[in-house]
Image (cartoon, rainbow, N blue to C red):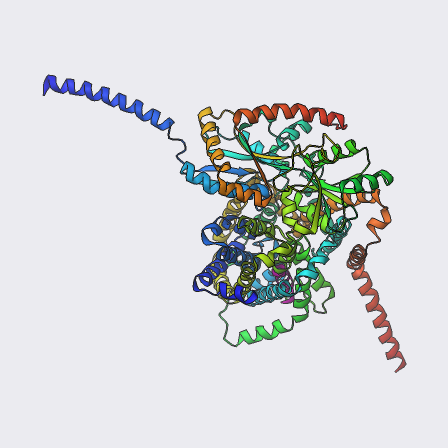
């Protein structure tokens, strides 16, 4: 015993210290180890919910923890995002985010509870361009028909959209300006409410997304797409650019974000998980079937796009006369 | 395809699922704080593992039975379990207090069952034409529907009409809190970001009904919340119940129709239907005693709210436009399983759709059996529980329920604040149901008004607001509802003057 046990103790201490240090780094690399909450800003059954549920399976397989989908509805998403920026930046709370909502809301009011820059963006994975939809039996067979009618009858053509000074409203304003016509905009409470509006003939047209075109099938006709290129979900529909109205580009983007201050490694880990899903052919097929276009912006690209678009919308809001 | 759907659902596995879902849905509906919307939303992921036929069957069963289950707490403890059973408490609870709780539950069960079944018949056979009617409702129609709903408020209160309208008005103001869905501005935010979403309807419901009732129970002495103890009745009493139920058949059919129609309208659901049906029964039925505990007062709201299930599915399945909030979730579930709602749904995936509809039928029938036995047993149990256990239990459930809505403490605080306000209403003799109805109708009314006003810029004010057939009908109904008491008493005076004349002559 005696001298030997002292030596033994020193060896034990050194091994123990090394072991603890090793364990420490193992902990850092062991994210995630408990369920992750995936907050959705809109009601169950909606597009954000359906997208998240389709991703849920793949995420749980990849990260080996449960993903709990919770709904924090209200304020057009601002309740959810205000909650996100107040959550712990430990990677166990993320939220689905929509652009340009998170850009426009803080630009339009000071009481949203969050600022555009506060969200740590992980990835942007989905895109739906705005489209102009009329009923199958509408007298407007092409976009040109509507433009000519509107020139002769200013203000008579009614177009339904979602909200005011939001994405679909901008699509409408850009179209009005590019074609030099006067139309009437009717704001609806959500994209769901625009469907019976067009089917029931209460408005001449609505600004929607390819997902609606898929849902409404042959009860409607799509006149044009607000994008630089044609939508993969609607390959036969011309863009506004092709039809002679450049600059009419607008649409909704879906991504995910984390609270401010989330460590870079965790953001990268989550981004790679979402990237894998986006490039999974089974997932891609399902999304295109439903009318969604997929795209991929990693954290850096996403942040750069947000900066660019914030400037763009600031200018747009002042051009169209928005007053706070 | 209809028969294939039936065969698909009649497997032992699926029948067990439907039975369990029916019982589970009953519990969800009965507990104040848990609603059909929540229950269905929580179980959507389950449908992945079960496959579309079993999964959708489970969702449908929970939907139908949760709406029915709301009557239990409405009758037994005067707090609606779901917003669709607000009016059930008006006559259901007085019946329970008189010791007739089992009769109330009997009436509610079979009213729900028949209302649900008839609406499913409409779904099976009349979907296309009825869906087209739903589409005719545009912004002006929704505005006038909300106005009509507000005239119905007048029948909700006991006593002073002014107090009832004041309560309804407070509900309207409460509905203005939050970001407007059409414009994006925030109203009445008070700097709290949690208020951006406005007041959650279910949190308001729990606050305005459950808390005052719990506080009320705390003030009661005695061992039971009922005035007359529950007495185990003889077997023969059920026949008298059946006979009395048969006597309500006119109310039953009318209320079912009201429920189907309101269910079809996108955006309106059981919350509005049950109150409108109650008002209609109270106004136009020849029976007296509404509010004191008569069977018609339970049959009307319960048949209407279950009728919105089938009604709401009509535009959902045929047009892809959800008739009620729960239908939006079901639509989402359908899309997750690659079932595109709309005209192609029945052609492409007829078997799954019809099996879903059959599952609803089976669940509704099961409700009639399971519900009655569970309901009466619960009545027996609750009548024995001392008030000092009941009150804290209700408050406990209220807090859990309002938190569960959005995982948000803010909703709990709102619920408690509204609870105190609701208690204040009680003390002042004001109706809390009027406030809830104002809360529900406010958004519909404002959105309809704004949209119709803008539309009238593109056309003409009169054409948009008045010269539409459905709008005109709703305006007429509103005027009738407002002035019916005056009209009825004028008619009564003329009748009695005529009788006096006859007597004087003869």
Residue A42 location (% of width, % of height): 59, 41
Out of B79 and B141, give the one closest to the viewer: B141
Q: Is residue B84 above or below residue A269?
A: below
Horizontal placement of B258 versus B391: left or right?
Answer: right
Out of B372 and B65, give the one closest to the viewer: B65
Residue B363 location (% of width, % of height): 52, 63
Extent of the magenta region: B295-307
Which residue is situated farthest in the right direction here? B505
Out of B361 and B211, give the one closest to the viewer: B361
Q: Is residue A145 above or below residue B25?
A: above
Horizontal placement of A256 versus B314: left or right?
Answer: left
Query: Residue drawn 46% across and 27% down?
Result: A268
Residue B267 visible in the displayed image: no
Question: For the stretch drawn in magenta, what is the main secondary structure?
Answer: helix
Q: How many marks?
A: 0
Residue A136 location (% of width, % of height): 73, 50
Q: Is residue B215 above or below residue B183?
A: below
Out of A179 and A58, give the one closest to the viewer: A179
Which residue is situated farthest in the left direction here? A1
Residue B309 location (% of width, % of height): 61, 58
Image quadrant holding the N terminus of chain A, namely top left
Image quadrant holding the C terminus of chain A, namely top right
């Amino acid at each position: 015993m005696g001298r030997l046990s002292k030596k033994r103790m020193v060896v034990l201490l050194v091994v123990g210290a090394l072991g603890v240090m090793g364990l420490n780094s193992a902990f850092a690399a062991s994210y995630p180890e408990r369920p992750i909450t995936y907050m959705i800003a809109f009601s169950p059954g909606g597009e954000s919910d359906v997208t998240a549920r389709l991703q849920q399976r793949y995420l749980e397989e990849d990260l080996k923890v449960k993903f709990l989908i919770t709904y924090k509805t209200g304020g057009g998403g601002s309740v959810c995002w205000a909650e996100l920026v107040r959550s712990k930046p430990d990677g166990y709370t993320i939220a689905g985010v929509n652009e340009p909502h998170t850009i426009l809301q803080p630009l339009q009011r000071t009481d949203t509870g969050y600022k555009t820059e506060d969200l740590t963006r992980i990835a942007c994975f989905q895109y739906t361009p705005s489209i102009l939809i009329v009923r199958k039996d509408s007298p407007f067979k092409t976009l040109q028909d509507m433009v000519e009618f509107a020139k002769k009858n200013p203000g008579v053509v009614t177009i339904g959209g979602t909200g005011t000074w939001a994405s679909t409203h901008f699509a409408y304003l850009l179209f009005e300006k590019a074609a030099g016509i006067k139309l009437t905009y009717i704001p609806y409470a959500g994209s769901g409410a625009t469907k019976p509006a067009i089917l029931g003939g209460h408005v001449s047209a609505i600004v929607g997304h390819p997902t609606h075109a898929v849902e409404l099938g042959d009860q409607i006709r799509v006149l044009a797409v607000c994008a630089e290129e044609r939508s993969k979900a609607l390959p036969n529909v011309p863009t506004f650019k092709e039809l002679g109205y450049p600059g009419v580009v607008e649409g909704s983007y879906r991504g995910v974000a984390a609270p401010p201050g989330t460590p870079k490694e965790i953001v990268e880990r989550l981004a790679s998980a979402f990237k894998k899903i986006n490039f999974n052919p089974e997932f891609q097929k399902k999304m295109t079937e439903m009318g969604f276009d997929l795209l991929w912006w990693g954290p850096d690209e996403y942040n750069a796009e947000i900066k660019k678009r914030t400037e763009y919308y600031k200018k747009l809001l002042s051009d169209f006369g928005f007053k706070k | 395809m209809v028969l294939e759907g039936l065969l698909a659902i009649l497997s032992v596995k699926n029948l067990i699922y439907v039975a369990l879902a029916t019982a589970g849905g009953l519990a969800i509906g009965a507990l104040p704080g848990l609603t059909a919307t929540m229950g269905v939303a929580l179980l959507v992921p389950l449908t992945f593992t079960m496959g579309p036929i079993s999964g959708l069957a489970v969702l449908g069963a929970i939907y139908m039975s949760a709406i029915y289950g709301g009557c239990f707490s409405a009758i037994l403890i005067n707090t609606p379990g779901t917003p669709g059973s607000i009016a059930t408490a008006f006559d259901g609870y007085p019946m329970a207090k008189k010791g007739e709780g089992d009769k109330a539950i009997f009436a509610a069960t079979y009213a729900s069952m028949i209302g649900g079944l008839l609406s499913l018949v409409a779904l099976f056979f009349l979907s296309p034409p009825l869906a087209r009617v739903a589409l005719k409702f545009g912004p002006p129609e929704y505005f006038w529907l909300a106005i009509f709903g507000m005239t119905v408020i007048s029948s909700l209160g006991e006593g002073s009409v002014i107090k009832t309208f004041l309560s309804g008005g407070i509900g309207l103001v409460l509905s203005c809190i939050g970001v407007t869905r059409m414009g994006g501005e925030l109203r009445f935010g008070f700097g709290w970001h949690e208020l951006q979403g406005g007041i959650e309807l279910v949190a308001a419901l729990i606050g305005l009904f459950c808390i005052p009732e719990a506080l009320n129970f705390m003030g009661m002495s005695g061992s039971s919340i009922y005035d007359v103890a529950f007495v185990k009745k003889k077997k023969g009493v059920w026949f008298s119940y059946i006979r009395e139920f048969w006597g309500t058949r006119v109310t039953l059919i009318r209320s079912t129709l009201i429920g189907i129609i309101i269910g079809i309208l996108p955006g309106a659901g059981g919350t509005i239907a049950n109150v409108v049906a109650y008002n209609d029964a109270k106004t136009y039925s020849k029976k007296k005693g509404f509010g004191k505990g008569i069977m018609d007062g339970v049959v009307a709201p319960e048949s209407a709210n279950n009728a919105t299930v089938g009604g709401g599915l009509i535009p959902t399945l045929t047009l892809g436009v959800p008739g009620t909030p729960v239908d939006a979730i079901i639509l989402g579930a359908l899309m997750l399983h690659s079932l595109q709602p709309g005209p192609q749904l029945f052609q492409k995936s007829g078997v799954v759709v019809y099996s879903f509809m059959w599952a609803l039928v089976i669940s509704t029938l099961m409700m009639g059996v399971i519900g009655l036995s569970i309901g009466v047993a619960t009545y027996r149990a609750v009548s024995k529980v001392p008030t000092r256990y009941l009150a804290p239990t209700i408050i406990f459930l209220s807090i859990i329920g309002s938190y569960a809505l959005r995982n948000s403490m803010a909703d709990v605080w709102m619920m408690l604040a509204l609870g105190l306000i609701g208690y204040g209403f009680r003390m002042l003799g004001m109706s809390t149901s009027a406030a809830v109805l104002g809360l529900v109708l406010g958004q519909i009314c404002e959105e309809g008004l704004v949209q119709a006003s803008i539309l009238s810029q593109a056309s003409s004010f009169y054409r948009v607001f008045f010269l539409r057939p459905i709008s005109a009908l709703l305006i007429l109904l509103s005027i009738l509802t407002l002035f019916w008491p005056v009209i009825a008493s004028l008619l009564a005076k003329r009748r009695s003057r005529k009788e006096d004349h006859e007597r004087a002559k003869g």
